[in-house]
Amino acid sequence: MATTSPSRALVLIDFINEIVDPDGKLAGKGYSDFIARHGTLDRVATLLGHARGKGIQPIHVRIGFSSDYKEQPLGSPLFGHAGKLGALKLGTWATEFHAKAAPIDGEAILTKHRVNAFVGTALDVLLRARGIMEVAVVGCSTDVGVQTTARMAHDLDYACTVIGDCCAAPRDDDHEATLRMLAKVARVTTLAAFMAQP
């Protein structure tokens, strides 16, 4: 039985097939190669098991758009061409969570339409309703979704931890540079160190 940690949550960002699976339309940007080289998804699976055992509440967040792409930010360099590519469509394999990072019954799932997990979602409301003011953030990509979410968590007065080796980016240098910058607003740690804490 899990030891309850009602004041802590684990926010997992964009571990969806379109981005992390080699067959995803966005995987070719470097994400799946990074993940394969660093064993990121295996670490995320271990992290999820640890969090569940400790009663740390996982919250799974994914990017996605409805079939008519009405939420798509047309001016975005990241998502402006999603509709033309038929990428990130909700209700398809593309926006399902990868098996190694998949939610189980009872875990919160949020859908976002921008990079930041707080923007346009109920994440802040959900955390505060549960009395949670301490969050650990992981995801793909370190330099986009994780960075913007961790910075927002800081400004919303959450104590934020980023578990660096459970994140992925298109390139190693982007990943490492982002973690260095995030150390100014969050505690940056490793999976081993996170699991070793009480």
Image (cartoon, rainbow, N blue to C red):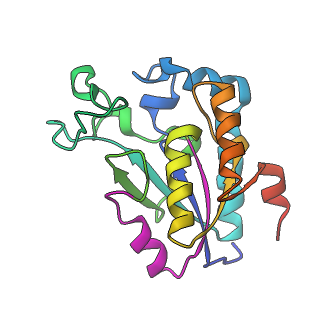
Is 127 part of what is drawn in magenta? yes
**Residue drawn at 72 percent across, 44 percent down:** 180
Quadrant (top left, top right, bottom left, bottom right) of the C terminus: bottom right
The answer to whether residue 12 is above or below residue 31 is below
Q: Residue at x 71, y 31 (%)?
A: 39
- Residue 141 in view in this figure: no
x then y, percent, for residue 75: 25, 33
Quadrant where the image shows the N terminus: bottom right
Q: Position of residue 88 (x, y in %)?
A: 32, 33
The residue stretch that appears in magenta: 119-139
Q: Position of residue 12 (x, y in %)?
A: 54, 51
Q: Is residue 161 left or right of residue 124?
A: right
Q: Residue 110 vs residue 20: left or right?
A: left
Q: Is residue 22 magenta?
A: no
Above or below residue 155? Residue 32 is above
Residue 139 visible in this rendered orientation of the protein: yes
x and y, in percent, of residue 4 in the image = 66, 78
Residue at 35 percent across and 52 percent down: it is: 111
Left or right side of 150 for 54: right
Above or below, comparing residue 122 to residue 180 in the picture: below
In the image, residue 87 sits, relative to residue 149, either above or below, namely above
Question: How many labels sit on residues?
Answer: 0
